[in-house]
Image (spheres, grey):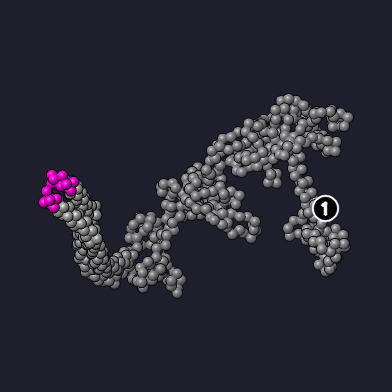
Amino acid sequence: MKLLFNRVMTTFGPKSRPHGRSSGRRGRHKGGRRWRITRRGSVAWVTLLVLTAATFGGVAAWSNPFSYISQSSSPEFATTIVKRGPLEVTLTEPGQLESANNTVLRHKVEFGGGLTILKMVEEGTFVEKGQVLAELDTSRFVKNAQQQQIWTFVYDAGLKTAEARLVIQKLQNESLNATGEHQLKMAQLDLKKYLEAEHPQKRTKFLNAIQLAVETLETAQLGVEYDEKMIRKGYVTTDELKADRLSVTKAELALEIARERLHVFDEYTHKRELAQREANAFRFERELERVKLRNEHALSQRQLEVLYYRRWSSYFRNLYNNAMRQIEACVIRAPHEGVVVYANGGASSNANESVIYEGAKVWEGQAIIYLPDVTSMQVNARIHESKILLVREGQPVTIHVDACSGETFRGVVEKVALGPMTPAWLKNNLKEYATVIRVTDEPERVVLLKPGMTAEVTIHVDPLESVLQIPIQSCVDRGGRHFAWVVDEHNEIHRRELKVRTSSADAIEILDGLAEGETVVLSPRSDLPDEVAALGQEMLLAEEAAAAGAASTSTTSDGWPSFFDDDVPPVEPAGDTTAAPATIVPPPPPTGRLPEAGTKNSR
């Protein structure tokens, strides 16, 4: 033991530490801070190493290549690689079986008042789905249905006649509208023909007449000029000159007449023709609007007639259908398989007297028969709040029942409660959510299950396709924080803090802190017990330091909490009187931890 102590002191003493790289094994926190054993921690580490050496065989323990003082290049314990791949997550919780369909069959006849039970099956009879269980008196509903059926026939006939008149009116409207549209179109075409063809043609004719008169006048004037020259020479007689001058006068009159005709056409004839054709087009347009309005009015009258008969027909048909529904409701059928149980004792003044029997009178809403379904079962389970976000409706479930050893049943998550269940008074901090799992096996297998049996459900959470993961044993949880030990390329160990999300039975998902392909220690709890113990001690010291720092400002001068001095008035602080008072927090007990809830402090 002395040799071992000398070796430890030689290793960790200030004179034996070489310059540059440390001879001890190094680690790294999440933020990249490297840690090493220093002289201040040598005494604690010496004690720890001495105990470890004594336990594992003395000096043989120092040959571990990943011990604090070893410099071996190859580890002897198992490691694993951080990989990315699918992760299947399952949740296993206890539960209790119950019937999913415990049906209560009631008197559902509306406004039926008290109805007499005419027939009933015997209590305890196993019935099939759709089998008649009870029949109530239907005499009043049968008479009402006959009356409503007669009125329905009357208004149905009136409705058919009104619908035929409506069709005829629609066809007549289409014909009248087509005639009016045709007349309007013809008037518009006449107007267009006049503006684009007739008017330009007539005006061109008048213009040509004027042009012809102008040329005739010019020719006559040239003839008169020629005669006046020739008459001096004796080639033309006076009579010929007079004739040519008469031709000029006629040409001038003809030109004036042609121009006057053009003026009359432009100022009167054209405007009259244009106004007449525009008036015709406008008249037919207005006539078409009047025809459409008359047709719409006639059509609305026919539609109102149809609506009148249709409403009354529908009204009496609804009354008839309602009467038939009441008649049908008087016949109570089994919605599923089950055993008939009479709903007795609840409505009688004497709890021991049977109130459901043939000939008894029942009232609207009164329970008549209970019909539990033994072929439809479900499991009621409670899921802790830390796992409830993983559970969703529709997820497959594997069910094991204690009473059916070796049998496995299938199920599916049918309902997840939105709020937590009310906890017991001894478990105020426990928050669990009720979850219903429906058994989906065949009815032949479901009948093996009975309400009240204890079951264990395994919910198969949707598998994650590609996530970063390590084995579950490679992660150490301390105070809600997760850590792993990484082996680098120099075979040095570095502690990393991890950010995780979910886990399966053998792997845990890594969100941050590790990279794909890195090497981690497979089982740090067994292979690195000293490092895990040091981590726990470090977390404990950090918690105690935080608690001591928070409590240092809340004690009195004698070390007791200030809130115990209820009868002592507060002392005004010296100096700045505007400073806010310190927050009152109980001081830590001698062990360094806060007192447990419910304990009393005494001086």
Query: How many residues crowd mark 1 within 10 Å: few (<14), some (14–19), many (20+)?
Result: few
Give the residue drawn at x 46%, y 49%: 439
Q: Report which residue position mark 1 lands on.
A: 590
Give the residue drawn at x 56%, y 35%: 85
Q: Nearer the viewer, residue 42 or 271?
A: 271
Q: Is residue 27 visible?
A: yes
Up-down relation of residue 568 to residue 462 (above or below): below
Q: Is residue 172 left or right of residue 126?
A: left
What amino acid type is highlighted by mark number 1?
Answer: Pro
Is residue 231 found inside the magenta-colored segment of the image?
Answer: yes
Q: Which residues are magenta?
A: 227-243
Give x and y (percent) for residue 479: 70, 46
Give the residue drawn at x 83%, y 38%: 41
The main secondary structure of the magenta stretch is helix
Give x and y (percent) for residue 554: 81, 58
Q: Can you tell which quarter of the image residue 106 is in?
A: bottom left
Q: Nearer the viewer, residue 347 or 3?
A: 3
Locate the C terminus and report the quarter of the image it occupies: bottom right
Badge count: 1
Q: Nearer the viewer, residue 19 or 9?
A: 19
Give x and y (percent) for residue 555: 83, 58
Q: Is residue 531 left or right of residue 109?
A: right
Up-down relation of residue 242 to residue 323 (above or below): above
Give x and y (percent) for residue 376: 43, 52
